[in-house]
Amino acid sequence: MSKIAVLGYGVVGSGTVELFYKNKDKICAKSGKDLDIKYILDIRDFPDSPYADKFTKNFDDIVNDPEVTIVAEVIGGMKFSYGYVKACLENGKNVVTSNKELVAEKGAELLKIAAEHNCNFLFEASTGGAIPIIRPLHVCLAGNDISAVAGILNGTTNFILTKMINEQMAFSDALEMAQKLGYAEQDPTADVEGHDACRKICILSSLVFGKHVYPKWVHCEGITKLTLEDVMYAQSWGGEIKLIGSVKKCNDGKILPMVRPAFVCNNNQLSHISDVFNGVMVYGDGFDEVMFYGRGAGKLPTASAVVGDIAAVAKMTSTSISQTWADSTDDSFIADYKDDVVSIYVRANGVAAEKISEVFGTVEYLSRENQPDGELAFIAPAMQEKLFDEKLAQLGGEILGTIRVLELE
Amino acid sequence: MSKIAVLGYGVVGSGTVELFYKNKDKICAKSGKDLDIKYILDIRDFPDSPYADKFTKNFDDIVNDPEVTIVAEVIGGMKFSYGYVKACLENGKNVVTSNKELVAEKGAELLKIAAEHNCNFLFEASTGGAIPIIRPLHVCLAGNDISAVAGILNGTTNFILTKMINEQMAFSDALEMAQKLGYAEQDPTADVEGHDACRKICILSSLVFGKHVYPKWVHCEGITKLTLEDVMYAQSWGGEIKLIGSVKKCNDGKILPMVRPAFVCNNNQLSHISDVFNGVMVYGDGFDEVMFYGRGAGKLPTASAVVGDIAAVAKMTSTSISQTWADSTDDSFIADYKDDVVSIYVRANGVAAEKISEVFGTVEYLSRENQPDGELAFIAPAMQEKLFDEKLAQLGGEILGTIRVLELE
């Protein structure tokens, strides 16, 4: 009998317990183990819960119980989770988590502790919610040299962008709607400024390229400056604007992780992902491209990934060799995004087409309904971003917005 | 040192050897084993191959070599592969395969032999080519009750349909182009009649629902009767026609696997999958819906899945408990598709709208450019298919075509 402890009985924690008991027979059959939840840790009381006898406020009950071999950390944040997870791993208990902040900030350290104690630290639920992405990346695609990953990794911003795209809602109205529906926090900074997507691309980058990528090293731009005009120009170009977290291998052996809104062409599957759904596109030498799509957040979708990891870890008899990466002491392996060659969309006011030709050469002009006199929008040819910046400064007029075009293949 | 034997040096076999040696260091690191290919079995001679010293024409060399612990069967068909795979498993050698026919016809038996000899029979490459689908289904989604799977499982037919949709090519012209490009065989029956997709949905059905589903039990319709008119009506309805292999759980505990062209609504991700790409949508209680997308065939994409299984099986110390199913002696657990409730598109000539109303009640009419007088197209309301058949027979006139609407959620 393998006993499970669930740390935290919030949205994901209660979903994990619910889904586990709903499908307990299937889960035990798939893992080949007689699994049960012995403890649920929460500082609150749940006297009316059907699981009332499992609740504890004392973490020591869990870490000191040798029957507990699997711990699901679903508290979130760092304050309690980091210490708890570390202690569990040091005691040889397998840990599965949905905590993206913990994995993005402490993944390398915790993976090392797990290996030292012959247990596992799994985190399928930390990235892409319900979407199987972590395990497919390091197991199913293990025969490949992966060159890039690009994803819609935050459901809140994708919901906002979908409202802007499909219903011509302004950013602020769409954000307000997301807040009313419970998709966005009252302080939406982590979502709309891209910090949440950044943690997830850090996790994917670390897993794919084998060295810990810390969020502070990643250039990150959110969606707060996007306008309906930008959305319309993107559509006239043949695509949609999406908040993309991506990482790619550069020619010099460095990698370039990044989060920013981007023009995504309609022939890229990512352009068709709407509402709160997430999608992750992966590029590699053998498989060419694969995409994984599903719900990136929510009670049961996130629980699905947590419970999947519980069933998987129950079968494991030693530390997984492939789901790990090394720590990194500095960011010398991270490329400067200003060195990257990229095509960039520009919307400007009061700039003559002659001036644009003089500065950028041949550009692709875009149009929109009710385009006012004096407004021009175009895609500048691909060039290093620092060169683009120099040229843009020569344009004069008023630059109303710039957005990069997604090109990874 | 784990030694690998590759059975067959055709398209997939040569791709497997190529990809393995290209990424050998990564593969060994991910599996934690010092892997190498010791034998390649083929009846032909390859004196100029860089792997010339590995070739053998004698299967006994492989099955009798205790150093060989992993065998990749990429011959295809049943004639040689069945006996070879059985013999390898009986000798405790792990087998990975890309052979959908073998898995669809003999999966239960071979999985049982593997379990009896504490080795593994893995087949990620048999379904969806490069797309990680087998392992995500039985590992990552193990916490869920899966209710349905629906996929575009055949790249050749999806290429043909894409040409019909995007370039208004007739079926026969699109097929000819697919043959010229090497996407379709000179005898295209297995693809265009849906037999290939049928084998794949049998594999997915067996894995998800735990009992072997044999191809002969699955209702299967191909795409040969589709017309450009049908494609146009589907678009006016807000979707595309795709060849869908699907399986769903019915209310009476039976399952309904099926292959047929279907109207797929544009808000279903499957509608956006074009050319030779495949996609598999999975529905379940916790995760809601996830989709897996990628190249469903081809040399390196299929090799990617074979090599992924090689790396995975190298890590396994006992038979996988979750990647298996039981044999089934009869089809009593398979629902009759004529009992299923479904909306169906009808194109008819010389039928009065009054008659349609009288027979079907309120229907949704569709239109197309240059719609001739006398032609009507509509979606009949959802009802059991056998009732639909009765009603259709009452319409009179000339029925030009019927296509089911995909509804699984």
Image (tube, coloured by chain):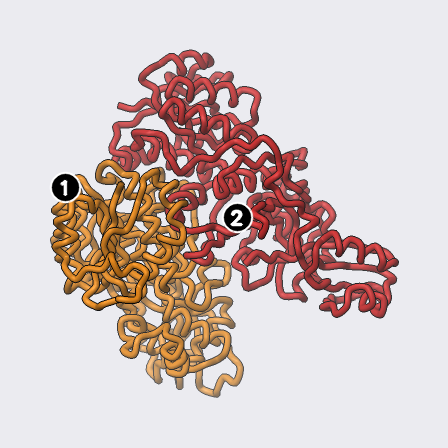
Chain colours: A orange, B red
Residue drawn at (39%, 29%), measured in percent from left and top? B120
Q: Quadrant of the C terminus of chain B?
A: bottom right
**Mark 2 packing: few (<14 Cα in 10 Å), some, or many (20+)?**
many
Q: Which mark is residue B277?
A: 2
Residue A327 locus on image (x, y percent) = 15, 50
Q: Which mark is residue A117?
A: 1
Provide the chain ID for the residue under circle 1.
A
The residue at the point 42 percent across, 18 percent down is B90
Do marks 1 and 2 share a chain? no
- Residue displayed at 36% across by 63% down: A299
Quadrant including the N terminus of chain B: top left
Element class at badge 2:
strand
Q: Tell me if residue A252 can be seen.
A: no
Q: Is residue A152 left or right of residue B198?
A: left
Q: Which residue is drawn at the image coordinates 65% and 54% (left, top)? A: B262
Specify few, some or many for label 1: CA neighbours under 10 Å numbering under 14, 14-19, or 20 or more: some
Disc 1 and disc 2 in contact, CB within 8 angstroms: no
Res A190 visible: yes
Amino acid type assigned to the residue bearing label 1 in the image: His
Residue B357: horizontal and vertical position, in percent? Answer: 80, 68
Amino acid identity at mark 2: Phe
Report whether B225 appears left or right of B123.
right
